[in-house]
Image: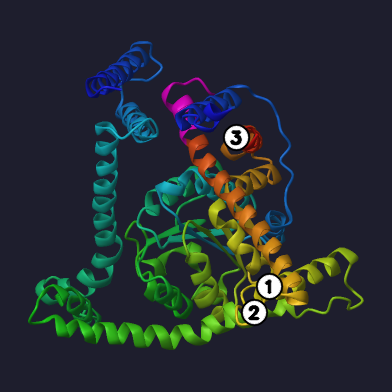
Amino acid sequence: MRKDSNFFILIGSIGLFVCINIFLMASGKLPFTSHSFGIILGAGLTLAIYSFLYRDNPAFKIAENLYVGVSLGYTIIITWFNFLKPDLYDPLIVPVFSKAATKEPQYALLIPSLLGIFMLLRFSKSLSWLSRWTFAFVVGLGAGISIPRVISAFILQQIKPSLQPVFSGSETILSSIDTLLILLGVISVLIYFIFSVEHKGAIGKLSKIGIWFLMISFGASFGYTVMARVSLLIGRIQFLLKDWLGILQ
Amino acid sequence: MERFLRIDRRFIFAIITVAVIISLILQFELPVPESEPVRRIYEKVESLPKGSHIMIAFDYDPSSKEELQPMAIAFLHHCFSRDLKVIGMTHYTGASGLAEQAMNLVAKEYQKKYGEDYVFLGYKPGGASLIINMGENLYSAFPKDFYGNDTTTLPALQGIDSLRNIDYLLDIAAGTTIETWLVYGKEKYKFELGAGCTAVMGPDMYPFLQSKQLNGLLGGLKGAAEYEALINKKSFAVSGMRPQSVVHMLIILFVIFGNVVYFASRRTRHA
């Protein structure tokens, strides 16, 4: 397709979108309110993002950049009002500089604040060494807290179901089969990933069973991924048909 | 045969879009049977006495809103209908607006009052350290709520000093926060944890269900639809299951078609 024909398709699509909105407003389906303009903007941006499925175009690029910019702006505002203001500005800065403040300044907050500022000094050639203090603190604290908890949650607790007795008396046949399958799956997949032994004979057969377990797991993941992507499409189309065009009730 | 292998993918996108639109417009019913992990969350909420404290972590942002917001709304319906006290918070900056919208919308339907029946603590960064802080002292982690109120004065938080006092916590997540809640929250402060997650994350969560580290799981839009059906509040998620099923059938047909064409064209080439 020639370049100028793409330009006309883009202009035509925008024109069609404008006409639909004029019709919706004139017919009263979308009242003349700020909420309606929000819906129109949302519909326009949704269509602009999905236009990438046809091919890359300026409408998609505008919507993409707008998304990144708005997200960042929103993040800054929320971080200020939800975190920096109540946790740092109000308890430390305000009591220090305002004579009307009733509470004593919390000087202990200077330590984490300084550590935070040190992190930003990575940008300075002469002072970047200070950031190592913060990183040392973060890594040391993180490792100290994480190691015991992660071992407990991700290793010890995860081993438990594999070590359950297959027949303990109180189990149903189905749950016993389930436990057996888990045992077989864990062992066969582990054997598949042992490369220091040649996969021949019994080891070869078990590693083949391991491949089957892996394939089933990848298939389940793929199925779920398809569902996730289709869910996003359904949600957006529900918005377009219900909130924008008013076709769905 | 060869031309079927070089089919323009935009043709497939168009078919999928038309299938979704038609199955949304045509109001046919499909059953939404509940699965065991979803039922366990429902039963846990049912088993809690009135006035119990439930915490919801709204750990998602608009990019996964379509899957997780219906889940949050369905769960809030259940909590408010059973007169439970709801405490909301988030690790995601982008979730604040969505969480506030969901909580206020459902609370209004049940005439619940902000501060007395539910509280939104808002966003705080920190991840693991925030959870540990909440586990030690909820009020030092959140001295103010989302609206700037002093959290120590809010009646809905009475009887709650830390995560240890929470009767149930549901993390509705689009990222790795479920693991963070598990490792630094549940393991340390011993509260019961359930999870709602995007469908992509679903299979990764099953080992935690098996080990009973998670009491239940709502996986993707299907999980939300099952919950809506369980509480008899069929809404966005249940209506989304129609196009979901139709599109899955289409994709299965496409896969079969693609394979048949591939093997047929290979045979023609070798002949």
Residue A248 in magenta?
A: yes
Same chain assignment for discs 3 and 1? yes
Q: Mark 1 belongs to which subunit?
A: B
The correct choice, above or below, for B33 with respect to A128 in the image is above
The correct choice, above or below, for B234 with respect to B215 in the image is above
x, y (%) of residue B46?
A: 70, 57
Name the residue rendered at 26%, 38% in the picture: A61
Q: As rendered, which of B57 and B207 lies closer to the eye?
A: B207
Task: Name the side, left or right, on which A111 lies relative to A141.
Answer: left
x, y (%) of residue B153?
A: 40, 67
x, y (%) of residue A174?
A: 86, 63
Residue on which the image places disc 1: B211
Residue B20 visible from this viewpoint: no
Type of the residue with mark 3: Arg
Same chain assignment for discs 3 and 2? no
Type of the residue with mark 1: Ser
Residue on which the image places disc 2: A157
Q: Which residues are magenta?
A: A236-249
Q: Secondary structure at mark 2?
A: helix
Q: Residue furthest right?
A: A169
Q: Mark 2 belongs to which subunit?
A: A
- Disc 3 from disc 2: Cα separation: 54 Å
Residue on which the image places disc 3: B269
Quadrant hosting residue B123:
bottom left
**For the residues bearing labels 3 and 2, Cβ distance under 8 angstroms:** no
Q: Earlier in the sequence, mark 3 or mark 1?
A: 1
Q: Secondary structure at mark 1?
A: loop
Q: Mark 3 belongs to which subunit?
A: B
Q: Secondary structure at mark 3?
A: helix
**For the residues bearing labels 1 and 2, Cβ distance under 8 angstroms:** yes
Look at the magenta stretch and give its main secondary structure.
helix
Name the residue rendered at 70%, 70% in the picture: A207
